[in-house]
Image (spheres, rainbow, N blue to C red):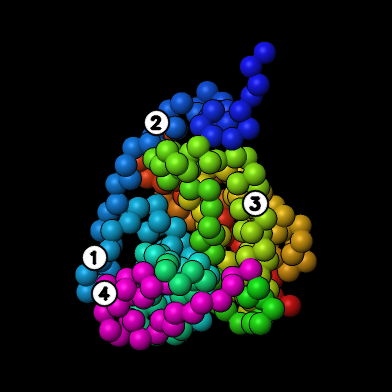
Amino acid sequence: MKKKATKGKEAFFRFYRELYGERWPSLAEALKREPRPVPFSEGLGKSYYLDQASIDTAKALGALPEEEVLDMCAAPGGKSLVIAAAMRGKGSLIANDRSASRRARLKRVIAEHLIPDYASIVEITSHDASKWGLYEQNRYDRILLDAPCSSERHVLLDPVHLERWSPSRTRRLAVQAFAMAAAAADALRPGGVLLYSTCTISPFENDGVIEKLLKRRGDFMEKAELSLPYGEATRFGMIVLPDREAGKGPMYAALLRKRMV
């Protein structure tokens, strides 16, 4: 009997076939196609291209002028541009990324695309998002956590990453994402909103993280109504998948609110 592969392409396809069943072949083919970025230009001096689902997800945070907003894992910066445009140069937007190389790209994106008045409210920082709640608590009106994730589209398009893949990848990233989400919950002010998003199709990193967060922080965090113009409902949020949304996504999002004390 042939031994089942525990890593690489065979293991990858078996893992997601078990999750998505008969849908997996068409979803895999959609993921293999090159993304179709669209221009975002609201409040920008120069358009920035990103997935339409990323634009609509960032808008779902609902950022407003005069608020204090945190983008915990901001690089390369597309969602930060969408948030900054909504804030219209009023308030405070912390755009954070721990990686020096990614942060350098984030700085370029902000400098090259945002008009000066809008860029003036953006502060770029380099903190460990998973420890944020240790240093700042009950501060932010809104937080976007676009968590580092499995990014299956990237894996499928990169033979090296595909051969290195194993199921432990999504489980490890889910643990990391929960730590960041818990820190975000602690950093929110009462009444504040957390938008959790990923570009993975793994339920472990999507609904699984939110389920754990509501169990561990359920005394003050609750599910809020998420508004996206398309996508499929999940237990705790919505997911946009390219096989059914004309190439948009993957993009998962869930909205949570911190209860008033």
Q: Which mark is residue 47?
A: 1
Label drawn at residue 29: 2
Q: Residue at x 46, y 68 (%)?
A: 74
Q: Position of residue 184 (x, y in %)?
A: 62, 70
Counting residues from the start of the chain, the first of labels 1 and 2 encountered is 2
Amino acid type of the residue that numbered disc 2 sits on in the rendered structure: Glu
In front: label 3 or label 2:
3
In percent of width and height, residue 205 lies at: 60, 50
User: Which residue is label 4 attached to?
Assistant: 112
Mark 3 vs mark 4: give the one in front. 3
Give the quarter of the figure containing the C terminus.
bottom right
- The mark lying in front, picked from 1 and 2, is 2
Q: Which mark is residue 172?
A: 3
Query: In the structure shown, which secondary structural element does the residue marked by tag 2 occupy?
Result: helix
Seen as rendered, the residue at the extreme top is 1
Secondary structure, mark 1, is: loop
Q: Main secondary structure of the magenta part?
A: helix
Dot placed on the residue nearer the N-terminal end, 4 or 1? 1
The x and y percentages for residue 72 are: 53, 70
Distance, label 1 to label 2, CA atoms, is: 29 Å
Residue pictured at 33% horizontal, 56% vertical: 50
In three-dimensional space, the C-alpha distance between marks 4 and 1, rounded to whole angstroms, equals 9 Å
Q: Is residue 63 visible?
A: no
Q: Which residues are magenta?
A: 103-130
Q: Nearer the viewer, residue 83 or 62?
A: 83
In the image shown, does 74 or 172 lie closer to the viewer?
172
